[in-house]
Amino acid sequence: MRKNTRTIRIGDRLIGGGNPILIQSMTNTKTEDIKGTVEQIKRLTAAGCEIIRCTVPTMEAAKALTEIKKQITIPLVADIHFDYRMAIAAIEHGADKIRINPGNIGGKDRVKAVVDTAKDRGIPIRVGVNSGSLEKELLEKYGGVTAEGLVESALSKVRMIEELGFEQLVISIKSSDVLMCARAHELIAEQTDYPLHIGITEAGTLYSGNIKSAVGLGIILYQGIGDTIRVSLTGDPLEEIKSAKRILKTLGLRKGGIEVVSCPTCGRTQIDLISLANQVETLVEEYPLDDIKVAVMGCVVNGPGEAKEADLGIAGGKGTGILFRKGQIIKNAIPEKELLKALTAELKNLTTQTQNQ
C-alpha cells in the first residue's frame, strides 16, 4: 500500500497522490555544454528516464537551461549548492523544479528570495538533506549522523519554507548507510505527507552501488514509501535508469517490457550460458513488448520444466539447444551459435502478432 502523499506538479508530470513512481537521473555533462547535455538527456529519456536533474554552479549554466528545455521532453530539475542567485536564475531560465538545501545557501532572507521566485513561477522546491550536510548541533544532539537527525534537519528546513507561505515541496533525505537511510524514510513518512524523492546517496560503482541501492530502495519502496526514485551510481547514468526500472518491476511497482530470467549455471551446463544470457538481455531491449518473460536456461533440467511459465525460452544441451514457448518445445537440436537467431525470430513474430491484434 503506497503512502498517501500530496500531489505536486513538476513540468507536465505529477508525483505523489498515488501517481506512478517516476525514475530520475542526473546529467554528468557540463550544463554549459548545451549540445552535450541535450544529447545525454535524450539518451536517458529513450532508456526510460522521466525527470532529469542538471547542476547549476554558474550563471552560464543557468542561462543554458533555456535552450536545453527547448530540446528535451521531460521535466528538468536544477541542482543548486551554496549560491541562492543560481537558484533564482535557474527558475527564471525555465527549470521545472529546483533542488536546494536551505541550510547551505545563506540566511532566511536568501531562502525567502528563492521561495518568492518559485512562488511567482509556480515551481516546486525539492528540499535535499544528506548525511554529509547535517548541522553541527544535530551531530552533537544525536552523537553523530543518525536517522533521527536527518529527519529533524529536513523537517526544520520544510518548516522554514512553510513559514514563508510556500508548500509546493518535495523532500529528499539521503545517506550512504543503507539501514540508516531506510530508517530515516520510515520516520519521515510518519511525520509528513510531502512527496519523497528516494535514493541511496554515494552508493558506489556499478557493482556495489546496484547492490546497496537494490537493498535500500527495496526496503523503502516495499513499505509504500517513495514518489520518485534515483539509483546513484558511479558510472554511465544510463545504468541508473536500467537499475531503477528493474527495482520497480521486481517489486511489482511497474509493468511493461520484457523480463529476462536465466539460471545460475552449474556443472551440467554445456554451452556458453553467461555470454548468451547477456546477449539476450541486450537483445530484448529492441522489442516493444509488454509483460513478456524470456528464459535463458543452461540445460534441459532447467529448460521447459523450471521455466515453463516463460513466454519464450531457450535451453542449451551439448553444443545445441532448444526453443520453447510456455513450456512446450517448438524447435529442437538448434546449434549453439544459432540459438540467439532462433530466439530473435520468435521475438519478431510475437511483436508482429501483438501489433496486428
Image (tube, helix red, strand yellow):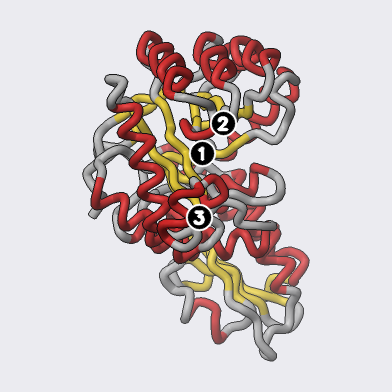
Looking at the image, which residue is at 52% across and 24% down?
76
Q: Nearer the viewer, residue 53 or 162?
A: 162
* First reached walking from the N terminus: tag 1 or tag 3: 1
Looking at the image, which residue is at 70% across and 13% down?
60
Mark 2 crowdedness (10 Å alpha carbons): few <14, some 14-19, many ≥20: many
* First reached walking from the N terminus: tag 3 or tag 2: 2
In-image side of 339 versus 51 (left or right): right
* Tag 1 near tag 3, CB within 8 Å: no
Amino acid type, callout 1 = Gln
Q: Residues under labels 1 and 3: Cα distance? A: 14 Å
Amino acid type, callout 3 = Arg
In-image side of 338 versus 135 (left or right): right
Q: Secondary structure at mark 3?
A: helix
Amino acid type, callout 2 = Arg
Quarter of the picture holding the C terminus: top left
In-image side of 214 versus 121 (left or right): right
* Tag 2 near tag 1, CB within 8 Å: yes
Pair 2/1: label in front: 2
Q: Position of residue 330 (x, y in %)?
A: 53, 68
Q: Position of residue 93 (x, y in %)?
A: 55, 10
Give the residue at mark 1: 24
Q: Is residue 356 above or below residue 89?
A: below
Give the residue at mark 2: 53
Give the residue at mark 3: 246
Q: Secondary structure at mark 2?
A: strand
Q: Nearer the viewer, residue 265 or 47?
A: 47
Q: Secondary structure at mark 1?
A: strand
Q: Is residue 45 above or below residue 265?
A: above
Q: Position of residue 241 (x, y in %)?
A: 57, 45
* Tag 3 near tag 2, CB within 8 Å: no
Mark 3 crowdedness (10 Å alpha carbons): few <14, some 14-19, many ≥20: some
